[in-house]
Image: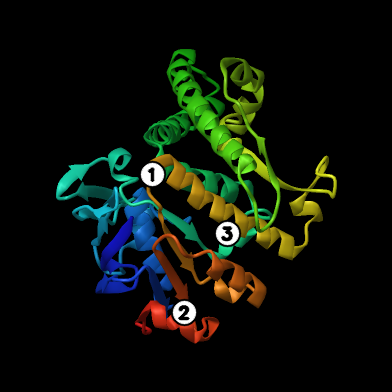
Amino acid sequence: MFLKSLRLTNFRNYAKSEFEFNSDTILIVGPNTSGKTNFAEGIFFLSVGRSFRAEKDGESVSFGKEVAHITGTVVFSKEGKIEDGTKLEVAIQKGDEDGTARKKYKVNGVAKRRLDFAGNLVSVLFLPEHLDIIIDSPSLRRNFLDNVLEQVDRDYRAATISFTKGLRQRNALLDHARESGIRNEKQFEYWDNLLIESGSIITQKREEFITFINDSRKDIFDFAVFYDKSVISKARLLQYKEAEASSGVTLVGPHRDDVSFHMYNNTRRTTHDIKQFGSRGQQRLTILQLKLIELTFIESTIGQRPILVLDDIFSELDQDHIKLVLEEIHGQQTILTATHKEFFDSQFLKKAGVIELKLK
């Protein structure tokens, strides 16, 4: 899998920019606020159909503009031969005052739903904040699971879209019931069944991915992942009925999942929580290993090596960790962003395609 071109129009700080990629390794260099993370975000939009940022997607449209366009061309190899390019396009229309955006997707000019758009370009994204997956909030760990599985599993995408819609509607019913003191059980029955069905798929797929992680070879750092799943069922919804009536939100389901990372002792018989007992260096080695496993998982699932996007992580790593990353970037197209060329030796720079961004 190879990203041949990327075009950003009215997207964040890009008024109209086009990039062509003719190398397996691309280095994007620019000072802070020059648009490096926005560049990575554009690639992620083409992969998943949404932003990786917490803000509303509508906020990605340039100030004073109504619509942003992201276009990319992807080529694939099959049995050693390069197939014709696939053109992907996302149009983001700035929405209401709350930032809710309307998005349109096209593949080779044909309109698609996000369900069928995502996964045409598959990428592994590594951001500075990913180094805090272990110690940060559970939502960051859930996002990691979603960002991997939504790209490679259509059933997972369908389940997350359905679950998100159902959760929003059910929470609205709970809030109304709390305010009015009236609960319509017939209304709850439909959304309960929807959440149970889609939530069960999400839990199963996450469990399979975590099993893959635990069974994978780990050359950089050995660890195990424990899955603290919040199973959703009729029995558990009944169990939490009174608590939900008081809180006005749904308290069980995959939106409450978490995972934890544990390192082995010398005998490999017991483990210690890396969040509590691991050093900062061990935590970062765990994430580096996790990203390499993500590459392997995607390749084993879709039969194509995804592209790897490393966004400004070298300013957060010491020289030993930088060396580890650079030793592992071969085998797929890799796009790196950095503030300075000095992070890389002359031999690397000779082989890489270098694009320099300026402050805008």
| Lower position in the chain sequence, tag 3 or tag 2 | 3
Real-space Cα separation, disc 2 to disc 1, in angstroms: 28 Å
Q: Residue at x 45, y 13 (%)?
A: 186
Q: Residue at x 48, y 66 (%)?
A: 310
Tell whether 200 sits left or right of 17: right
Residue 99 visible to the viewer: no
Instruction: Give the numbered dot on residue 127.
Output: none
User: Where's residue 231, x and y in %?
Assistant: 60, 26
Dot 2 corresponds to which residue? 348
**What sort of colour scheme is used for the picture?**
rainbow
Label 3 environment density (alpha carbons within 10 Å; few <14, some 14–19, many ≥20): some
Dot 1 corresponds to which residue? 303
Indicate whether 337 appears above or below 210: below
Farthest-out residue, front: 80
The amino acid type, in three-letter code, at marker 3 is His
The amino acid type, in three-letter code, at marker 2 is Phe
Q: Residue at x 48, y 68 (%)?
A: 311
Dot 3 corresponds to which residue? 130
Comparing 324 with 170, the one in front is 324
